[in-house]
Amino acid sequence: LQAATAALLHRLGAGEDIPLGAPIAGRTDGGLDDLVGFFVNTLVLRTDLSGTPTFTELLARVRESSLAAFEHQDLPFDRLVEAVNPPRVTGRNPLFQVMLGYHHRPEGDAATLLGLPAEWYDMDTGTAKFDLDFTFVDASDADGGITLLLEYATDLAAPETAALLAERLVLLLDRAARTPGVPLRDLDILTPEEHAKATGTWDGTDTGDGTGTGGWNDTAHPVETRSVPEILADTARRAPA
């Protein structure tokens, strides 16, 4: 999921070095097992997309770099920011602007809490902490599949833009799973409607530019059939100089 998210941002023009923030539970020490408290830390996971990697090659890169990052998950995020000292911009998170979360909720998970029935309850704070926040909820153990929750800053993206972003991620995952040996640059992330518009097979009623049906490449228009001598003679009459 990290590889797919980074690959999507790369294909949409975010560059070859994609940093993603990731929340870490912060309970690697066994002595914390019975301790009540909030120990969550934030890791910065960098994804290298240089060259022309296939999705299989990208997975290997992500595995290597992420496991190396997990070795330092006890380093507080604030200490990392202080050491790197990146340029600060008001309203932007330092080091990364896209968060990536993963929750594994197997069958029966959180069904009881201290002997009482319990269930997950998602809260909407009404505020986006990052430009984009991809949260994947994995209930595949219960045949529930994986659900993507995409949070976005409304001053940067419209609802339809965010929905299209999520749709492109699903398309990329599907095509990468089918052809993992194909270079990322060749994975098609156009929606079926966009593909039809680009190839001139779209049968919609409006392209958004007033040209009607046919799609983005519908440039056909009536042309008078004339011979080359006739065209030359007409041009000579209109512009003899």
Image: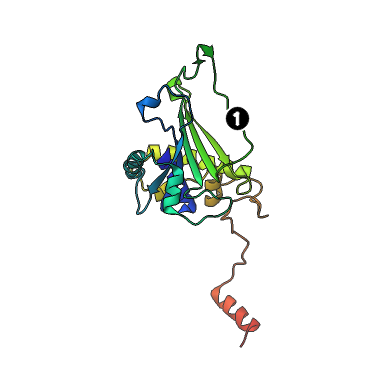
As drawn, the residue found furthest toward the top would be 115
Q: Nearer the viewer, residue 169 or 98?
A: 98
Q: Which quadrant would residue 143 be assigned to in this image?
A: top left
Q: Nearer the viewer, residue 195 or 227?
A: 195
**Kind of residue indicated by mark 1:** Met
Residue 162 lies left or right of residue 181; in this view the side is: right
Q: From this view, report whether residue 22 is shown above or below residue 214.
A: above
Residue 188 visible in the snapshot: no
Q: From this view, report whether residue 113 is shown above or below residue 146.
A: above
Place of residue 106 in the rendered image (x, y in percent of width and height, measured from the top left): 44, 21
- The quadrant of the rendering that contains the C terminus is bottom right
Q: Which residue is mark 1?
A: 123
Q: From this view, report whether residue 208 is shown above or below residue 2.
A: below
Residue at 60% over, 30% down? 123
Place of residue 72 in the rendered image (x, y in percent of width and height, measured from the top left): 35, 41
Place of residue 27 in the rendered image (x, y in percent of width and height, measured from the top left): 40, 30
